[in-house]
Image: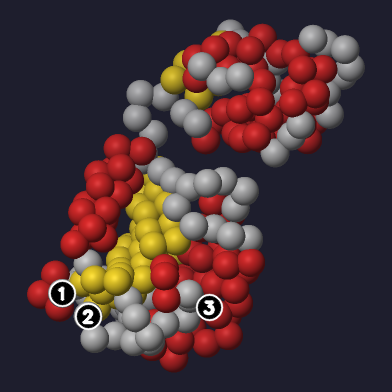
């Protein structure tokens, strides 16, 4: 398990305040303050939450014990099968809930997703909307099949509209392949995600506002 010294060192590497660590780990600032001042023995669950938050931010815990920043985090994850898109929706929710970060999806064809995904996909969308996760969706011009509030959508010209749906959220970039078999490929890398985020925003800036 990580030590108090590692937590303090990791905060210093990230230039995080106790408030920022508390928010990232889903804890209160007094909990972090109490832990770092060694006023009480921390719970295992608390240390696990802190470790997970710091690793997600790019900290690597080394032998010694010590800490260092990962030079470039690059992880891949693949979901395959009929539930692949549902699993992607759940990963997007878990990654973004409670943050101010946006979900950006390009290649949206809501009619096709509704026909294939049915109630399972609608339930995941409703959960995301209920928790106020910010969303931008790029559909094709002429498409009036909207599941979410129309303000979430903009319409791309047909010649630029991608046939493969892509998803950008936090440090992740995902691609949904219709198959068969249906497959989701998720790449977790800050530089790659930011590259595609800027590309998405360029398309968003020139796309038309959607209207019912």
Q: Position of residue 148 (x, y in %)?
A: 48, 76
Q: Nearer the viewer, residue 97 or 181?
A: 97
Closer to the camera: disc 2 or disc 3?
2
Q: In whole angstroms, how far apart are the C-alphas of marks 1 and 2?
A: 6 Å
Neighbor class of circle 2 (other Cα within 10 Å; few <14, some 14-19, many 20+) is some
**Label 3 environment density (alpha carbons within 10 Å; few <14, some 14–19, many ≥20):** some
Element class at badge 1: loop
Residue 10 makes an appearance in the image: no
- Where is residue 136? Give x, y as percent: 39, 62
Task: For mark 2, give the secondary structure.
Answer: loop
Residue drawn where x is 52% and y is 35% of the image = 56
First-in-chain label (3 vs 1): 3
Q: Which residue is mark 1?
A: 157
Q: Earlier in the sequence, mark 2 or mark 3?
A: 3
Q: Which residue is mark 2?
A: 141
**Along the line of sight, the residue nearer the viewer: 17 or 7:** 17
Q: Is residue 159 above or below residue 201?
A: below
Q: Is residue 147 visible?
A: yes
CB-based contact (under 8 Å), mark 1 and mark 2: yes
Horizontal side, residue 59 vs residue 22: left or right: left
* Residue positioned 44% across, 46% down in the render: 170
Around disc 1, counting alpha carbons within 10 Å, would you say few (fewer than 14), some (14 to 19), or many (20 or more)? some
Residue at the location (59% across, 73% down)? 126
Q: Which mark is residue 93?
A: none
Question: Label 2 vs label 3: CA separation?
Answer: 23 Å
Q: Is residue 101 left or right of residue 130?
A: left
In the rendered image, which residue does mark 3 sit on?
Answer: 121
- Dot 3: element: helix
Of the two numbered discs 3 and 1 in the rendering, the one whose residue sits closer to the viewer? 1
Q: For the point 53% across and 78% down, which residue is it?
A: 121
Locate residue 132, reporting x and y percent: 58, 60
């Amino acid at each position: 398990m990580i030590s108090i010294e590692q937590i303090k060192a990791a905060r210093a590497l990230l230039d995080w305040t106790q408030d920022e660590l508390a928010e990232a780990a889903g804890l209160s600032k007094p909990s972090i303050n109490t832990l770092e001042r060694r006023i009480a023995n921390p719970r295992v669950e608390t240390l696990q939450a802190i470790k997970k938050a710091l690793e997600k931010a790019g900290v690597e815990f080394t032998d010694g014990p010590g800490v260092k920043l990962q030079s470039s985090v690059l992880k891949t994850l693949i979901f395959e099968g009929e539930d692949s898109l549902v699993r992607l929706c759940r990963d997007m929710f878990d990654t973004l809930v409670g943050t101010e970060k946006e979900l950006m999806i390009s290649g949206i064809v809501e009619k096709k997703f509704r026909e294939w995904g049915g109630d399972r996909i609608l339930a995941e969308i409703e959960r995301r909307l209920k928790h106020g996760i910010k969303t931008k969706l790029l559909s094709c011009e002429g498409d009036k099949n909207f599941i979410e509030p129309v303000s979430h959508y903009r319409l791309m010209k047909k010649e630029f509209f991608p046939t493969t749906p892509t998803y950008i959220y936090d440090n992740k970039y995902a691609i949904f392949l219709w198959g068969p078999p249906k497959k989701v490929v998720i790449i977790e890398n800050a530089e790659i995600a930011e590259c595609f985020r800027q590309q998405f925003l360029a398309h968003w800036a020139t796309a038309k506002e959607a209207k019912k």
